[in-house]
Amino acid sequence: MSWWRRLFASRRMERDLDSELRFHMEQQVADNVRAGMTKQEAGRAARLEFGGLQQIKEDCRESRGTVLVTSVVQDLRIALRQLRKSPGFAITAVLTLALGIGANTSIFTLVHSILLRSLPVADPSHLYRIGDRNDCCYYDSFQNEDGDFDLFSYDLYLHFRQSATEFEQLAAVEAGGASFSVRSGSVPAKPLRSEYVSGNYFNTLGIGAYAGRPLHDDDDKPGAAPVVVLSYQAWQTDFAGDPGIVGSTIYVETHPFTVAGIAPPGFFGDRVIAFPPDLWMPLAGEPLIEGANSSLLQKDTDWLYALGRVRPRTNTVALQAKLSAALRQWMHTRPAYTEHGRAALIPRQHVVLAPAGGGIQRLQQHAQTGTGLRMLMLLSMVVLLTACANIANLLLARGAARRADVAMRMALGAGHGRIMRQILTESVLLSLIGGAAGVMVAYLGSRMILALAFPLSRNMPIHAGPSMPVLGFALAVSLITGVVFGAAPAWTSSRAQPAEALRGINVSSRDRSSLPQQGLIVFQVAMSVVLLAGALLMARSLYKLEHQDLGISTRNRFAVQFDPRGAGYTVDRLPALYRQIEDRFSALPFMIDMSLARYLPLTGGEWGACVIPQGHPAPGPNDKCFADWDRVSNGFLSSIGVPIVRGRGFTTQDTSSSPLVVLVNQAFARRFFPNQNPIGLRFGTDSPQYSTAFEIVGVFADFKMTDPRKEAGPLFLRPLTQQFAGFKEPDLDAGEKSFMYMRSMIFNFSQPQQNAEALIRNTLADIDPNLTVSRFGSYDSEVAWNFNQDRLMARLTGVFGMLSLVLASIGLYGVTSYLVARRTGEIGIRMALGATRSRVVSMVLRTTLLQVLIGLALGIPAALLAGHLMSRLLYQVSEYDPLALLGTTIVLGICATVAGFIPARRAASIDPMKALRSE
Amino acid sequence: MKTEKKFDLPQGTLDLLILRVVALGPIHGYAIAQRIQQMSRDALQVQQGSLYPALHRLEYKKFLAADWRPTETGREAKFYRLTAKGKSQLQSETESWARLTEIVELILRGPQGETP
């Protein structure tokens, strides 16, 4: 018989065992009678001789080897029966667990897909990236203070390929990526995300094509027929899954490209980002689209990440040293790194070889996302621990109520181990049910978090659905949770003294048996302090971020991104287009002003240049010459509500033929012209020979252009109409020309608008139907997007904080009630002896508050530590913020008092007579 | 008193005794205990607490088979009988027991003078 069949035959076997032993007993009795005993004596003697019947039965079962399986099944059955018998307890526990485990699992879903997941590529462990930073998108000199290099020019990439044969394949991929107008057939152009990659990109990653073919090296040669590979998602959403698209021609920024193939469904690129590429183009296609401004042809323009597959058993430390040497050797050949004393910086330049199986970890290493996720994981664990403490408390109380039951079973021969196992079975069963419910909570939770975290994302590569690792995580957490909260109750129950319990001792005064409960409460309070303090810190930080003075107005304004180049405009046709746009939009009802700009503040674009004031030499290696700059139409500053503090703004007098003028911000004036009136002074960019190019005509108030967490840096503005024609280097000249293309518009209405989007889109389509809007939004929401992660973190920590506060309050209330109930007799005696109600209340409250005080004493140092760990996430809030700690203490104090006061009042209303009679 | 002379059976010996008794013909548990007691001239008294687990262990190992039959009093009891496997087990166990006692004896009666 297999053990399985034996398990099912167990009922019959139990019957047999029973009758067999009974038969033996009867025979014994009969023999005893025959030997001359009375019937009663005979029975007694037989029973004495036989010993513990249940014990013998258990030994018989054990000798058959079924005992483990049958006893587990038995334990499960008993556990289910116990839970059914007290549905209130079961539901409370399951809900608490579902919240705790759900919170953990949903955070883990994100952690897994952002921090832990490998790229869906062949053999990701052999993928390495040269560089471990996240610099973006174009550099043309040294990159980081410590000499860490991560962005490379095409020339440098080729140099690496040549010097490091340890790479089976070394691919290059554009760091930035753009939104391009893509036209197919007669359908209006669509804005699609693009990424330039080297021809061996797909080969390096080991990615094939879903349809057609991936890119090959041959596609990436000068003069090769221009091709693209579409992402599966873009093919589905933007090309309706049309299989005929492979081999057909689409127009990218008006240039014809052949669709070579479609990437596999799960492939979202080499990194996890909110806007994954919709199409990949070979690097050779870049000069085609960018023309003279191509970065590919510039030997010093760093704009590529390098990602390679190393040969098996490569020593990566040696490879890293070799690559760093190659980098320095290359730099010595480039004037950009050797002129003006810069060669002194070369010795410290190096690269770091980073594992890239998880992709180029932009999102992972993004300080806030990475730290934030890790912190959330920690916080959700703490929530789960408080939940565990609550359930352990419930179980302890139940265990006390079931002492008689347990004692009876022990008297009948159940061992300590068996009792413990059974109680643990019950708690693990409970936590598994809670875990199953938690998986559902987690699905909803992670969907909500994703929607909050990446509201504008398109083709998001992260999914909320539970995957195998996530389910495994939930299962593991449930099991551990069950053991954690079941261990203490199981241990105390199994130590029950059968004799004592059977005598019915169920009343006590201040006894030690409630110490575990009180310890758990102290723990809960401490954990709540950590969570609440964290939540308050995040909330205060968010408030400071959102209510800071950004220096711009966003009210009733709308921001639009568009792409005149993609609509086929050449530089010479731009002034007419801009005039038309300004005229048409300014005439719209309620329009106060509108403007065109290359980049709008705080919407995610920036460009910079090295500023050289007139008469200054070329900056040395350690001079900070960098300033942001932007090209804008005349109405720009007023359209974003920024005042001119000195001089004048741009006017219609500033034309293409008048002297070149610029506006600078206060930070610019302080940096480059300290203690001078900058009006009338001149500066240029890139090289001393151009340092007379621009004349400062006005200074405007500082506003935050890129990072709302940082102070406003130097910024200068140039008018839409003026182009500097003096650049002798073709690349500088090409850059200047390409900067004539505006990409953003902002509209300032005098009152709230309902149909602004339709109005603006229609007006633009009226001007030219080929002009596509790649992004539209109220300026409020576009700016608010900067605080998105902070808001999410603040909300989640807030939710966690509330959750643990509620749990701790419930726990405190429960334990206090329980203690009061157990001390009914004692309190009755006290009152009979003359204790007043208020003395009883204060006596009970004292115990409660003592627990809270100890909890605070333990929790506050822990909260300080947590604050220190999250200091990177905080904006203008000290990690040791006294207000947050004070707030936490007050909130906890109030909740604890309420939670303690209710049972205390109940204790005070005890009728001494009744209490004493019940003993 | 007989009970004072009771001693613990060495590990595994009870199994051998049970097999030996059952080899005489189908027999139920109570009778096995009785028979061992008789055959040992009351020197051995088998405790039920060890008898039944041993019976079930031997049945589980397929040295014994069991079925329910009426006794001479007409009451149903579980009768054990030896299986083929049990028979060879009994044989080999008996042999090794004989060898063991022989060896133990040999040592105990070893060169005179060294024993006190």
Image (cartoon, rainbow, N blue to C red):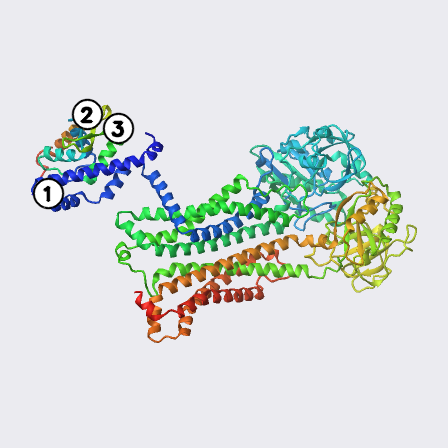
Q: Are marks 1 and 2 on the same chain?
A: yes
Mark 2: amino acid: Gln
Q: Characterize the local packing of mark 2: few (<14), some (14-19) or many (20 or more) Cα atoms within 10 angstroms.
A: some
* A82 over A310 or under it: above or below: below
Marks 3 and 2 sit apart, C-alpha to C-alpha, by 15 Å
Give left or right: position of A581 versus A123. right
Q: Nearer the viewer, mark 3 or mark 2?
A: 3
Name the secondary structure under disc 3: loop
A336 or A379, nearer to the observer: A379
Marks 1 and 2 sit apart, C-alpha to C-alpha, by 31 Å
**Position of the N terminus of chain A by quadrant:** top left
Mark toward the start of the polypeptide (1 vs 3): 1
Q: Position of residue B17 (x, y in %)?
A: 17, 32
Mark 1: amino acid: Thr
- Disc 2: which residue: B91
Tell whether label 2 touches label 1 (CB within 8 Å): no
User: In terms of image quadrants, where is residue A3?
Assistant: top left
Q: Position of residue A17 (x, y in %)?
A: 25, 37
Name the secondary structure under disc 2: helix
User: In terms of image quadrants, where is residue A337?
Assistant: top right
- Disc 1: which residue: B3
Residue B62's label in the rendered image is 3
To which chain does the residue with label 1 belong? B
Give left or right: position of A530 versus A398. right
Q: Are marks 3 and 2 on the same chain?
A: yes
**Position of the C terminus of chain A by quadrant:** bottom left
Q: Position of residue A757 (x, y in %)?
A: 77, 49
Q: Is residue A741 visible?
A: no
Mark toward the start of the polypeptide (3 vs 2): 3
To which chain does the residue with label 3 belong? B
Mark 3: amino acid: Lys
- Residue visible at 19% across and 25% down? B91
